[in-house]
């Protein structure tokens, strides 16, 4: 094998690695990012809207000041959207912690029910603290009745 063949082979292998890295580059999927941010006036609403409108990949921006909710649809990363809103507006912002009332099994347990939630929404059980989630599960009637007659429960009913 000659020197020219070795250099050509080396060039081809380096070039093929570069192509495979381009193919492996992950693209963002179309998603809806919902953020909770307090807006007092129209100026706050305009500042929140302008903070994300210029982002690359954003398709639409919807601001609802009554619910304190910002909805961004597009090919974006949720973490980057949240960071940009916090950085550009200087306001405290967090991911939308509420889900519709119908999607939660027990919406009025202490860890899930939130008085500040908009009408028809309760706190998302995935966002709730793990300790509170155990309390929510333990207070449900189904679990109390099934553990009352369980062999693993030392204080279970022995009448059976």
Image (spheres, rainbow, N blue to C red):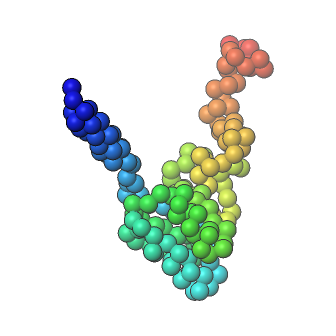
**In this picture, residue 148 sits left or right of residue 53:** right
Q: Residue at x 21, y 29 (%)?
A: 2
Residue 56 at x, y = what percent? 42, 67
The N terminus - image quarter: top left
Residue 111 at x, y = what percent? 69, 49
Residue 28 at x, y = what percent? 40, 54
Q: Name above or below for residue 88 compared with residue 82.
A: below
Residue found at the very far right of the displayed protein: 155
Residue 70 at x, y = what percent? 52, 70
When asked about the image quadrant of residue 60, the answer is bottom left
Residue found at the very far front of the displayed protein: 3
When asked about the image quadrant of residue 99, the answer is bottom right
**In this picture, residue 158 sits left or right of residue 17:** right
Q: Residue at x 59, y 74 (%)?
A: 88
Q: Is residue 123 visible?
A: yes
**In this picture, residue 80 sits left or right of residue 16:** right
Q: Residue at x 68, y 63 (%)?
A: 115
Q: Is residue 13 visible?
A: no
**In this picture, residue 43 sits left or right of residue 109:** left
């Amino acid at each position: 094998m000659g020197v020219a063949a070795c250099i050509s082979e080396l060039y081809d292998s380096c070039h093929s690695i570069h192509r495979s890295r381009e193919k492996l580059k992950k693209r963002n999927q179309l998603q809806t990012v919902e953020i909770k941010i307090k807006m007092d006036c129209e100026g706050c609403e305009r500042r929140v809207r302008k903070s994300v409108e210029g982002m690359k990949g954003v398709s639409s921006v919807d601001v609802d000041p009554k619910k304190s909710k910002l909805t961004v649809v597009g090919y974006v990363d949720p973490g980057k959207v949240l960071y940009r809103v916090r950085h550009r507006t200087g306001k405290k912002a967090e991911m939308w912690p509420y889900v519709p009332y119908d999607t939660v099994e027990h919406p009025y347990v202490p860890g899930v029910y939130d008085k500040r939630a908009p009408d028809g929404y309760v706190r998302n059980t995935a966002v709730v603290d793990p300790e509170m989630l155990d309390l929510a599960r333990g207070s449900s009637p189904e679990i109390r009745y099934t553990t009352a007659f369980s062999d693993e429960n030392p204080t279970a009913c022995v009448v059976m």
